[in-house]
Image: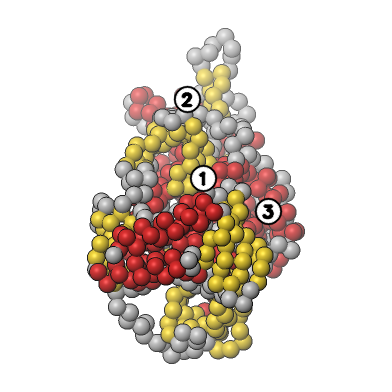
């Protein structure tokens, strides 16, 4: 909102203000500013400019906005809603796609509405875009609800490392985004500590009618492991699997993590594309885990 | 600054309100702001036409008299300016409101907002109670995405540097056809002009700014192109039989059919596409998952584990 608009953006807003005010005669300047995503000062500047527009011999646009409420007359030429631009269609249809994949299956009525809208608004553009959400929007709505009402949440969580499914009662603390993914920070009663959960691994969630714990537990200070990893093959895939924990370029990189089991599994699952060079304790732990895995085949 | 936006609005009013073609000289007299030498006025007018076109307003060029083709006129056809969306229900408008709110703070938020305003101007009240409480989110602050959307909307060629599987940067030139998101990643698909084939690119693997090239409308998106086909997960045609330690590796179990439910082990049939993916999935779970079949994959996993031991001893 603080971005200064270009003259073209301002012109577009002026054109769109006319039909909006016409269909909402007497709207307040503050509501208009909010709807158009600009400050009241900028909106007033738009209205002032608009006032001067039209054919000045007999056809100036008549605007009234003295007391904080706006109405418009004599703007027949511009009083039509403009066509949606391709960018607008793409933004709306991508949004509709994401919603449709979050809606409960039994809401066939809404799913049909979205299908109709895609065709009505899309004009053929709808086929060039496709979106599925990274996380379940229903879970995010529940987490937001818990944060707002300070209540506890019960979740079924799929652990990343050993892949076990556990039922946990948590008190949500924060919701944040990192690397295009949603995360929940919460106090977990099962772990009796603060934990971070990836929203897309929460398989189901229920809001409990219990007040959330208010005490803040400091995050456990796990010691970090610094390891030197050699990427032998598949540079891009290996690097991406190390995510944001990796630094350095080329085939020998530094990895900093506080979970040895995560690093060990990542290296073993790479099927030989990566190997740990140092420290030796991490190397022997990996060799030990691989031997244990081999044992089941004997 | 403000004079230019007023000039654009006045130009729109004049060209939209006229029933006959307006010549350039008529436009220059009627509208304030076209000043200076004839050449300067011409350039201003050309730029204004481009700016209006970028807003989706098409200016039509025509001539008064077929015998005098040099005397061209301009106008905006009301039916190309006006929204032709006939009917939108209150519930549909609420769905659109929700769809646009997803973009808050993300890269297309101004387009989403201006689109919503236009639809609200049709004078429909929304009916938010009809919509269940869901809050899908979109996380893309990558400015390249905005450029790609512009390129698709205006059918302009783009170029960028892309990281290959071996992490070398390669310049790719693309006629973008479509864009989308899946599993938290964003993609663009289009005709790769060097490889002469439709290719899919992941936005986080683009390691330069996406540059626009050439003119708008320089290619046609094939009528049979559908982004959903390019983002669809390939059908997993192979089946592996796995033994999974009870309670572990639920990600594998949830994607499988259980065929034997033992006390310590569960035997499942797990669909997969390529053996390499199967090995990665199974290796992650160490001693909690054993490959029973296919025999080929079973011997490969033993070989891999032996290599890991040898590399770390």
| Quadrant in which the N terminus of chain A is drawn | bottom left
Q: How is the image coloured?
A: secondary structure
Query: Is residue B177 or residue A190 the one in the foreground?
Result: A190
Point out residue B237 in the picture as x, y percentages from the top left corner. Answer: 61, 48
Residue of label 3: A114
Point out residue A149 in the picture as x, y percentages from the top left corner. Answer: 56, 82
Is B157 positioned to the left or the right of A16 in the image?
A: left
Element marked by disc 1: strand
Q: Residue at x 57, y 25 (%)?
A: B21
The answer to which of marks 2 and 1 sits earlier in the sequence is: 2
Alpha carbon distance from label 3 to label 1:
19 Å
Residue of label 1: B179
| Chain hosting mark 3 | A
Graded by Cα atoms within 10 Å as few (under 14), some (14 to 19) or many (20 or more), the crowding at tag 3 reads: many
Same chain shared by disc 2 and disc 1: yes
Element marked by disc 3: helix
Query: Is residue A159 or residue B241 the one in the foreground?
Result: B241
Is B292 positioned to the left or the right of B34 in the image?
A: right
| Chain hosting mark 1 | B
Residue mark closest to the camera, 2 vs 3? 3
Check contact, mark 3 vs mark 1: CB within 8 A: no
Element marked by disc 2: helix
Q: Is residue A188 visible?
A: yes
Q: In the drawing, what numbered circle is on residue B24?
A: 2
Give the farthest residue toward the top. Answer: B67
Check contact, mark 2 vs mark 3: CB within 8 A: no
């Amino acid at each position: 909102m603080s971005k200064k608009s270009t003259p073209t953006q301002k012109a577009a807003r002026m054109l769109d203000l006319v039909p909006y005010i016409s269909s909402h005669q007497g709207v307040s300047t503050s509501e208009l500013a909010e709807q158009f995503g600009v400050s009241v000062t900028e909106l007033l500047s738009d209205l002032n400019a608009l006032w001067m527009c039209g054919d000045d011999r007999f056809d100036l646009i008549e605007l009234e906005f003295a007391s904080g409420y706006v109405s418009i007359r004599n703007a027949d030429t511009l009083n039509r809603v403009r066509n949606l631009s391709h960018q607008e269609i793409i933004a709306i249809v991508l949004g509709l796609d994401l919603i449709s994949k979050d809606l409960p299956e039994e809401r066939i009525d809404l799913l049909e509405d979205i299908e109709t809208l895609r065709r009505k608004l899309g004009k053929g553009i709808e086929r060039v875009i496709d979106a599925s959400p990274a996380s379940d929007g229903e879970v995010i709505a529940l987490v937001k609800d818990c944060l707002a009402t300070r209540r506890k949440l019960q979740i079924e969580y799929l652990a990343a490392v050993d892949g076990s499914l556990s039922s946990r009662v948590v008190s949500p603390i924060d919701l944040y985004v990192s690397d295009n993914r949603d995360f929940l920070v919460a106090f977990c009663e099962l772990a009796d500590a603060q934990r971070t959960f990836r929203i897309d691994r929460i398989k189901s969630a229920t809001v409990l009618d219990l007040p959330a714990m208010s005490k803040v537990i400091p995050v456990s200070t796990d010691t970090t492991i610094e390891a030197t990893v050699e990427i032998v093959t598949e540079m891009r895939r290996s690097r991406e699997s190390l995510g944001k924990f990796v630094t350095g370029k080329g085939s020998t990189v530094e990895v900093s993590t506080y979970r040895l089991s995560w690093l060990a599994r990542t290296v073993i699952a790479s099927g030989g594309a990566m190997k740990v060079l140092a420290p030796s304790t991490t190397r022997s732990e990996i060799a030990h885990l691989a031997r244990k895995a081999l044992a089941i085949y004997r | 600054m403000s004079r230019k936006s007023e000039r654009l609005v006045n130009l729109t009013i004049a060209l939209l309100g006229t029933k006959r073609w307006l010549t350039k000289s008529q436009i220059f007299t009627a509208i304030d702001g076209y000043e200076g030498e004839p050449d300067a006025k011409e350039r201003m007018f050309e730029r204004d036409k481009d700016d209006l076109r970028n807003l989706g307003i098409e200016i039509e060029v025509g001539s008064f008299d077929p015998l005098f083709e040099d005397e061209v006129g301009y106008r905006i056809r009301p039916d190309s300016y006006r929204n032709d969306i006939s009917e939108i229900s209150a519930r549909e408008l609420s769905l659109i409101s929700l769809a646009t709110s997803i973009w808050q703070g993300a890269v297309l938020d101004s387009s989403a907002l201006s689109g919503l305003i236009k639809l609200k101007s049709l004078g429909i009240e929304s009916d938010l109670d009809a919509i269940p409480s869901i809050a899908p989110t979109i996380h893309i602050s990558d400015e390249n995405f905005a450029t790609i959307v512009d390129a698709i909307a205006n059918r302009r060629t783009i170029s960028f540097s892309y990281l290959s599987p071996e992490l070398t940067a390669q310049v790719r030139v693309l006629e973008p056809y479509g864009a989308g998101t899946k599993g938290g990643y964003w993609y663009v698909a289009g005709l790769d002009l060097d490889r002469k084939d439709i290719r899919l690119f992941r936005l986080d693997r683009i390691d330069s700014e996406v540059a626009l090239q050439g003119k708008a409308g320089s290619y046609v998106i094939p009528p049979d192109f559908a982004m959903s086909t390019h983002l669809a997960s390939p059908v997993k045609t192979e089946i592996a039989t796995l033994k999974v330690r009870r309670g572990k590796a639920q990600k594998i179990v949830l994607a499988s059919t259980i065929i034997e439910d033992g006390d310590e082990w569960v035997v499942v049939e797990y669909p997969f596409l390529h053996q390499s993916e199967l090995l990665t999935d199974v290796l992650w779970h160490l001693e909690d998952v054993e490959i029973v079949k296919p025999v080929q994959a079973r011997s490969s996993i033993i070989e891999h584990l032996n290599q890991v031991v040898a590399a770390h001893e």
